[in-house]
Image (cartoon, rainbow, N blue to C red):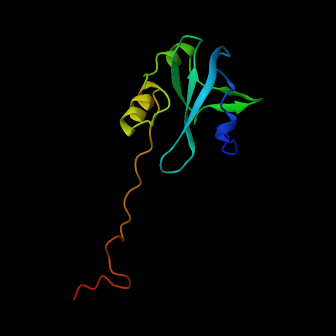
Amino acid sequence: MQTDVDPRNLIGRKAFDRNGAKIGTIDEVYLDDATGVPEWAAIRTGLFSRDAFVPLEPSDFKEGTLHVPFERSLIKDAPDFGVGRHLSPEQELQLYDHYGLDITAPQSPDVTFGKVAGAEDDPT
């Protein structure tokens, strides 16, 4: 998704699925705890319906609307965690799994961590 979009500007915007069918209206945007980058949107799927979480990363914001690259039925079947609360790492994993998205593995640790600065590997 465009990184220059202010997440507050997404709230109240319409969202559409991969086929152009209207999903609903964006109620909330959830930011990544570590980076502060918008990661999930909660979309109100109907007047008496619940909110469905959709990932923002593979989605596209164009012409004032959010286009999510998934079928409407998959979106409506997403796990329901309620809105207005923090998503736990476990809940995020469930959502990634639901959408079949890979999460990047954590970076390998720095191999120099724990070594004394200036110390050489001298075999003597």
Residue 17 seen in the figure: no
From the viewer's side, name the closer residue of 124 and 111: 111
Farthest residue in the right direction? 63
Residue 99 is left or right of residue 16, and the answer is left
Q: Which quadrant would the C terminus be assigned to in this image?
A: bottom left
Percent from the top left, x then y, of residue 108?
A: 38, 57
User: In the image, is residue 94 above or below residue 109?
Assistant: above
Q: Which quadrant would the N terminus be assigned to in this image?
A: top right
Query: Residue at image x 35%, y 70%?
Result: 113
Percent from the top left, x then y, of residue 51?
A: 52, 21
Q: Across the whole image, how many numbered discs are drawn on residues? A: 0
Q: Quadrant of residue 120?
A: bottom left
Residue 45 seen in the figure: yes
Residue 87 is left or right of residue 64, and the answer is left
Farthest residue in the bottom direction? 124
User: In the image, is residue 52 above or below residue 32?
Assistant: above
Percent from the top left, x then y, of residue 9?
A: 70, 36
User: In the image, is residue 117 above or below residue 45?
Assistant: below
Farthest residue in the left direction? 124
From the viewer's side, name the closer residue of 51 and 116: 51
Query: Residue at image x 46%, y 16%?
Result: 77
Percent from the top left, x then y, of residue 109?
A: 36, 60
Query: Residue at image x 75%, y 29%?
Result: 64
Residue 118 is left or right of residue 29, and the answer is left
